Image: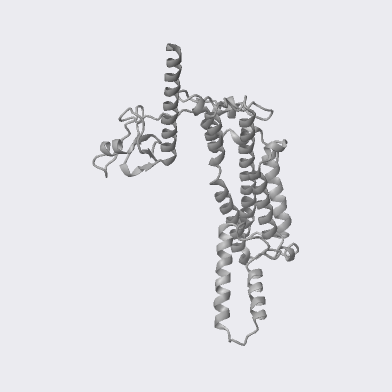
Amino acid sequence: MPHATTSRRKLATRRQNSEDIEDIRNTQLNGKKDDVSDEDRPRAARNAKKEKKANGKQKQRAEPEDQDEDAVAVDDEEDDEDDRIDVSNLPDEPLRRSDMHKLNGMTEDWRNMRAQIGQRGDIYKDVAAAMAEAGEESVETSEDLQEIDAAMKDFLDVDAEMEAHATTLDEIYQQLARGERIDKPVERYDNGLEERKNNYAGKTTRQKYARDERYKLFRSSIWDVRHPDDPMPPITEFIPKEDGDDDDDDDELETGGVTQNYKCPITLTLLINPVTSKVCGHSFSADAIKAHCRPVSAQHKCPAAGCNKSFKLSDCISDAKLDKKVKDYKRRQAANARDDDSDAEEVVD
């Protein structure tokens, strides 16, 4: 998987994510005794382990007092082994339909871990915005922003690798569900995973990131600080074209810039407690759209100019992310106003 080669760009988050992936893979595929800490285990696996421990304790209480404690411990160990595909014994034997729930559990472990790590992705956007507010102009001119941009791409690469693990396992699960014979499952898993990783590595930078909404939000967080009243250019303005980028794909990406209007279409003032329609994506101040959508159970035409869609008040969902953007915008506008007043005073003096 290609990534930035400088040591500055290999941030602790990237290293930790990679270690987590390797730990989970070793635990799931090599059939080793459980040597991963509960903190490093995906939530689903941790919950399963807690349930096994609880069941083991109940079983121990139910046994006669003179029963050998070592025998109980051995029984628990055997139960743990039964709940895991012992891959070391499977290469020369086909998987059975009874193994399907284990494959599904391993898939869910990867996706749960991906979801948990994905929740931390906003930190790159927030750090980039803070750097821009501190005076860094753009990724193209700032080494610090270049470093956080590389870290953001590394984060997306790790996300893609975790999904490759889950997709490969799910493919084997689906084949088994269709009644196909699954011989040498570890070899099939390794080959499928390697193929997906190679396919991803062979993509161009645009193909990896230009359509990823998380990367678009990352770049727009920088742009909005430096150009609060101007729409961001198409994302391809920031990602040079490479061999392998199709003209048709580029045309789709070049369609207009990314812009964010922080004014309510009804009040024409900055949004207050914004809500966003699930039907058309337009956002409104909460009180304004409540007043517009009367009676609340009826369909109402969207009040945004040029929108012909209709929705109910219940289709409008509170938008915490947009609310934060509006507050950041107001704060930047206030800071710019103070700077302008300071400059004017200096001129008068």
In the picture, measured across the screen, residue 219 lies left or right of residue 69, that is: left
Residue 196, placed above or below residue 307: below
**Percent position of residue 199, x then y:** 68, 41
Task: Give me the residue at 56% from left, 67% from top.
Answer: 50
Query: Is residue 148 visible to us here?
Result: yes
The answer to which of 251 and 12 lies nearer the viewer is: 12
Residue 72, placed above or below residue 285: below
**Percent position of residue 182, x then y:** 68, 60
For the N terminus, the quadrant is top right
Task: Give me the residue at 24% from left, 40% from top.
Answer: 294
Kindly give the residue lying farthest to the front in the view shown.
Answer: 349
**Percent position of residue 70, x then y:** 67, 79
Kindly give the residue lying farthest to the top in the view shown.
Answer: 348
For the C terminus, the quadrant is top left
Q: Which quadrant would residue 51 be assigned to in this image?
A: bottom right
Q: Which quadrant would residue 143 be assigned to in this image?
A: top right
Q: Which quadrant would residue 42 be assigned to in this image?
A: bottom right
Q: How is the image coloured?
A: one colour
Kindly give the residue lying farthest to the left in the view shown.
Answer: 295
Task: Give me the residue at 56% from left, 34% from top.
Answer: 128
Query: Is residue 181 visible to us here?
Result: no
**Percent position of residue 113, x then y:** 58, 52
Badge count: 0
